[in-house]
Amino acid sequence: MLTAEQILAAHKANVETLFGLTNKAFEGVEKLVELNLQVAKTALSEAADTTAAALSVKDAQELLSLQAALLQPTAEKAASYSRHIYDIASATGSEVAKVAEAQFADAQKKFTAVVDSAAKNAPAGTENAVALVKSAVAAANNAFESVQKATKQAVEVAEANFQAATSQAVKATQTAARASSKRAAA
């Protein structure tokens, strides 16, 4: 049976975990805000430079060359921005997952201890019921571990797909920029 102290300790641990997770979430948001401020500053500076360059263009061919020169870095910057956002989200999610796994492992351990204690103090003739409960706990633990493994594999596949798609987008933009440059030169 749980004592009042044990219940209080469990609630205290849960509150500490909640605040820890909240801090991790705020750290992720803070990183996103920093990234967006950096991108905004850079974009403003580049917009001023681009405007100055566009105003100094003397003919249409020079304008096409300028456009082609600007196209490739823009796509690479967009891909880099996406990667940064993905990294921040992934790191924050990973921290939350670690805490959740630790909490679940602790809860499993405590529940198993309660079941074992109940089994030792169970009245005679309830061995089958105790065995059934232990079997259900083991099955639940196995199911959770399977879901955890599947989730980790899905995250790895999603990350690989994201990296491949980003790389393909940059390559496509580079190809388009080269084609634009050739047309401008012709």
Image (cartoon, helix red, strand yellow):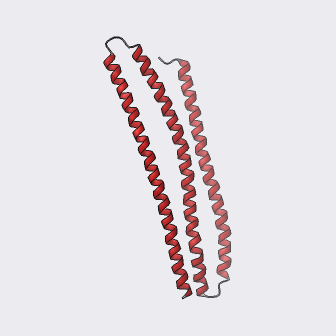
Point out residue 177 in the picture as x, y percentages from the top left corner: 54, 76
Q: Nearer the viewer, residue 29 or 91?
A: 91
Q: Is residue 139 left or right of residue 184?
A: left
Q: Is residue 97 above or below residue 58?
A: above
Q: Nearer the viewer, residue 21 or 142?
A: 142
Q: Quadrant of the C terminus?
A: bottom right
Q: Residue at x 51, y 70 (%)?
A: 171
Point out residue 30 in the picture as x, y percentages from the top left corner: 63, 50
Residue sticking out furthest to the top = 124
Q: Is residue 32 left or right of residue 115?
A: right
Q: Residue at x 66, y 76 (%)?
A: 51
Q: Residue at x 51, y 37 (%)?
A: 100
Q: Nearer the viewer, residue 108 or 156?
A: 156
Q: Quadrant of residue 33?
A: bottom right
Point out residue 157 in the picture as x, y percentages from the top left corner: 44, 53
Q: Is residue 163 above or below residue 150?
A: below
Q: Is residue 139 left or right of residue 57?
A: left
Q: Is residue 134 above or below residue 182?
A: above
